[in-house]
Image (spheres, rainbow, N blue to C red):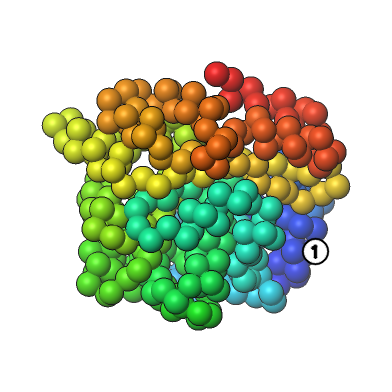
Amino acid sequence: MQNRNQLFDFAIDQGATDIHICAGSPILLRIGRKLKPVTEDKLTPEKSRDICYEMLTDEQIAIFEERLDFDLMLAYSQARFRINVGYFNGAVGATVRVLAGDPKTPDELFLPKAVKTLAQKEKGLVLITGSTSQGKTTTMSAMIDFINATQKKHVVTIEDPIEYIHTNKKGIVRQREVGRDTKSFASGLRAALRQDPDVIAIGEMRDYETICTALTAAETGILVLSTLHVISIDKMIERLLSYAPEDNENTIRFLLAETLQGAIHQELLPLIGGGQRVACEILINTTGAKNIIRRKGGYHLRSVIDTGKKYGMSTMAENVGDLLEQKLIAPETAKRVLANYTT
């Protein structure tokens, strides 16, 4: 790879989701769930630094060398690249996430019908949950695009960084990037409440102030979309409460029970023929779910999902089973995923 653009072109052509640039290793692409080398020689610290610095401006290099970490987005060809540059064992390296240039639609992502139904809610909270790199931002972007294409609504997003660029369709989408357009998720969210929004999309709920403000906004008649890093839906309550002072846990429980419309938990699975597909588990906040959120441990939500098909709920086992029946995923993939969803 002679330069940055050649590397980006090759990653796009190979269907890679990530590029790893690391001293002492060849350049690696993540294709499916595996890391594959794309250069024969291992990178020297100098070569690794040079490749990384080609992605930065002189000003960004100066900021990086002061902070020791730097995040940015780059647009190239028909894709966008989310880049994290850092020091690793004293050498400069980078991890690059390859993103589609335009948001996908729910249909293009093969998302369940319940996702569109949740996107049509007038108010309340919708959470997209999953562990790291499971496509949560892509799903939220698809929901925003669906709202934008079908409803005359004002959508304000607070993101870090902005990964997908939305153009106005029937509605208006105004995107704000943390660090550039607003100082933090919390301050951006407070400002959004004064910007006449119908929908607020928050890249991630990662502190108590943001969680409280988001729940309050959802309670007062705004549809709030956000992502949350958890390994399963039944860990959702525990995760949100982990940010709250002990004496405020009941407040969070009450607000979540009253405002939650539903949660979409997802896993990104490798397909037999190449590429990836999201498998989802859907929770709809029924009366039974509300009671669990108010009073009990999150593990009781599993039984709600198992018996909630008539409300639009679906289990991970059902979704993975459908993909297996269609011969889209390998049996070992299904076994690996479902091992985490036993009741």
- Quarter of the image where the C terminus is located: top right
> In the picture shown, does residue 316 fall above or below 171?
above
Is 225 left or right of 255, judged from the image as shown? right
Residue at the spot x=44%, y=28% of the render? 301
Q: Quadrant of residue 271?
A: top right
Residue 49 visible somewhere in the drawing: no
Element class at badge 1: helix
Closer to the camera, 23 or 29?
29
Residue at the spot x=25%, y=43% of the render? 255
Q: Residue furthest front?
A: 310
Q: Residue furthest top?
A: 343
Residue 314 visible somewhere in the drawing: yes
Q: How many C-alpha atoms fall within 10 Å of the one at disc 1: few (<14), some, or many (≥20)?
A: few
Residue at the spot x=47%, y=28% of the render? 304
Residue 69: x and y in percent read 43, 56
Q: Quadrant of residue 325?
A: top right
Closer to the camera, 283 or 247?
283
Residue 95: x and y in percent read 58, 54
Marks counted in the figure total: 1
Is 274 left or right of 245, judged from the image as shown? right
> In the picture shown, does residue 154 fall above or below 276?
below
- Quarter of the image where the N terminus is located: bottom right
> In the picture shown, does residue 51 fall above or below 26?
below
Q: Which residue is mark 1?
A: 13
Residue at the spot x=23%, y=38% of the render? 254
Residue 225: x and y in percent read 41, 56
Residue type beneath disc 1 = Asp
Q: Quadrant of residue 77?
A: bottom right
Closer to the camera, 93 or 104?
104
Residue 300: x and y in percent read 42, 23
> In the picture shown, does residue 100 fall above or below 338?
below
Is 285 left or right of 96, judged from the image as shown? left
